[in-house]
Amino acid sequence: MSARVVFKSALLSAVFSLGMLALCTLSLPRVEAASSSEIKQVVDSGAGLERSRKWVDAIEHYEKALKQWPETSEIESALRRSKIYLGIERRYSDQSFIRMLPGLSRSEALRMFDEVLDHVQGRYVEPVTLQTFVAHGTESLWYALGDERFQKANIPARHHADAKQVREILFREYWNKEIGSRNECTRVISDLCNLAEQQLQLQAGPVIMEFIFGGCNALDDYSGYLTPGRLNDLYGNIDGQFVGLGIEMKAEPGKGMLLMHVLPESPAAEGGLRSGEFIVGIDGKDCRNMNTDAAAGMLQGREGTRVTLDIQGKVRKLPRQSTFTRRAVIVKSLPVVRIIEGSDGVGYIQMTSFQKSTVAELDAALQKLRAEGMKSLIWDVRGNPGGLLTAAVEVLDRFIAEGAVVSTRGRTSDQNMSYSAHRPGTWNIPLVLLIDGDSASASEIVAGAIRDYRRGTIVGRKSYGKWSVQSIYNVSNNAGLRITTAKFYSPLGLTHSKVGVHPDIEVAIEKEKEATRFADEVNFETDKDIRKALEVLRGELVAR
C-alpha cells in the first residue's frame, strides 16, 4: 500500500500530534562567509545544547546559522550529529519501536533491511548507491554505540566501557567501506553483528535497525523509516481521525508539555484544557523535563482507558489535576469558518491540513458562508504543513476554472503526473491567501497555483520551501517507509524548493509573536495579516 503525501517533515518537528528538474531555478541571495570566531561561537553554543541533550534546540540553532552562512562544514557536521542523536533518542522513547523492532532475529532484521533498500533504490527520487546507504548506517551505529540511552537499552552494563573500542574498529575498518553488491552489503552488516555480539553481547536486531534508520539518513529530511507508532500517527493525520485526547504539544524543558492546540469536541477540550497551558505530570509522574516523545508515549493508549494529568494553567500558580478518557477524535481541517466583515461580506476559512475530509469540509464551508452573505474570501493556510496531494488539487479546483494546477516528476513513470482544474463548481469570488514560513508542501501547491494564475493576492511571509512528494509504503512488522518519490512544479513549471513562495504583500511579524501563535486562536482585531487582507479586499470591492 502507498499514499502520496506532501507534508512538511514530521521527523524533526518539535510538535507531536496525539492522534498527524526545474524549468526555472531561483537563485539564493549572496551571503558573506563566516569568520572563524563566528563559526566557533555558533559551534560552542550548539555544543552546550547538545551536552544538555536539547537536540531540537540544537538543530534549530544550527539551521538558523546555516541560513546565514550556508555550506559551512563545521556547522553542517554539528547539525548532522544532532539530527542523528535526536533520531536515536526518539527511537528509544517510542514504545512501538521498543516492543517490536530491536528484538528481531538477525534473519528477520536483514529481510527488513533488504525490503527498505529495495524501495529506496527503486523509487527514491534520486539514485542512492549501496555504499552510500551502508555508510550512513555505519555512521548511525557509531553514534548509537556512544549514546547512553542506546547502551542502557541494548548492552549489559559491564560492557558499556567496551563500546569505545568497538567504535574505534568501526571507524578504522568500516568507515565509507566500498560496497559493490548486495551480497557484500549483507556480509559487512553480518560481520558487524558478529563483532557487536562478541565484544558487547549486543544482539543483531538493534545493530541492523541502525543500518535501516541510518541508511535513510542518506535521503532527504522528508524521508525516513517509520516505527509502527509513527506510521499510525501519519495515517491518523491523513484520515483526520485517531484515538487519544485531542492535543498537539511540544516539550519546554523545565516547564512541561506546552499545549499548542486543543482540538474542538475532544476529551481534552471537554475536560477544560486550553492552548498555552502546560502538562506537568502524567499519571503521577513529573514530565517537566521529559522529551515530547516520552510524554506522548505515556499519553497514548487504547480507546476507553483513562489518564490523569497535572495541568499548569496560564494564571494559577498551583497545578490542577484532571482525568481524561481516551476515545476516537475527529480532526477538522477547517477549524474556523465565519464571516468577519458582515457589511462587506468577507468570509474567512482557516485550513490547517490537507486530509481526506478537507474537500468535503471546504464545500460545506463555502455553502455556509454564501448563505451568510459572503462576497469575498480570506483563505488562511498559515502554519499548514501540508498533507494529501490530491486534496490540494481538489481544493484548488474550487477556485481555478481550468488548466493544470500542479505537476510531479520522479524516477518512475507512475510519479510523472499532471493535475488539472475543471470549470464546473468554480467559485469566482475575490480571494486573499494567507501564508507564512510554516506553510509547506500542499499549502505551497495552493500558493504556487494562485500566484501563477493571478487568482488572488498572497499576503504574509514567504512559505517553507518544500516542493517534493512523499510516498508511504507499508513494510514488515507493521512499520512503514516514507520516501520522496517526486518533485512538484507550479502551473508555469516553477519550483520554489528551499526558497519558498514569496507573498505579493509581505507583512512583518515579530518572531516571538509568530512562534507563540496557537493553532486554535485567531484574533481578527489584532492579526496583522488578516487586517492587511481586509484592506486588499475592500480595495477590490471599491474598484468594482
Image (cartoon, grey):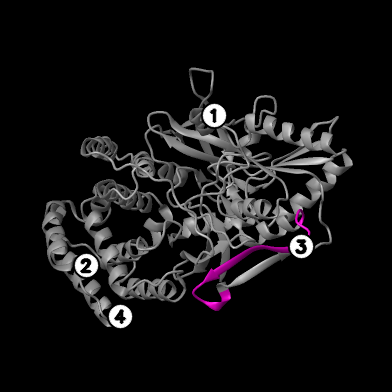
Could you tell whether 279 is left or right of 268 in the image? left
Q: Is residue 400 magenta?
A: yes
Around disc 3, counting alpha carbons within 10 Å, would you say few (fewer than 14), some (14 to 19), or many (20 or more)? some
The spot of residue 97 in percent (x, y) is: 40, 58
What is the C-alpha distance between the residues marked 3 and 2?
51 Å
Around disc 4, counting alpha carbons within 10 Å, would you say few (fewer than 14), some (14 to 19), or many (20 or more)? few
The three-letter amino acid code for the residue at tag 2 is: Asn
Task: Give me the residue at 56% from left, 54% from top.
Answer: 441
Helix, strand or loop at mark 3: loop
Could you tell whether 176 is left or right of 13 in the image? left
Q: Is residue 145 magenta?
A: no
The three-letter amino acid code for the residue at tag 4 is: Arg
Q: Which residue is mark 3?
A: 402
Q: Can residue 345 be seen by looking at this rendering?
A: no
Could you tell whether 366 is left or right of 73 in the image? right
What is the C-alpha distance between the residues marked 3 and 1?
43 Å
The three-letter amino acid code for the residue at tag 3 is: Glu
Q: Which residues are magenta?
A: 398-414
Q: Nearer the viewer, mark 4 or mark 1?
A: 4
Q: Which residue is mark 2?
A: 176
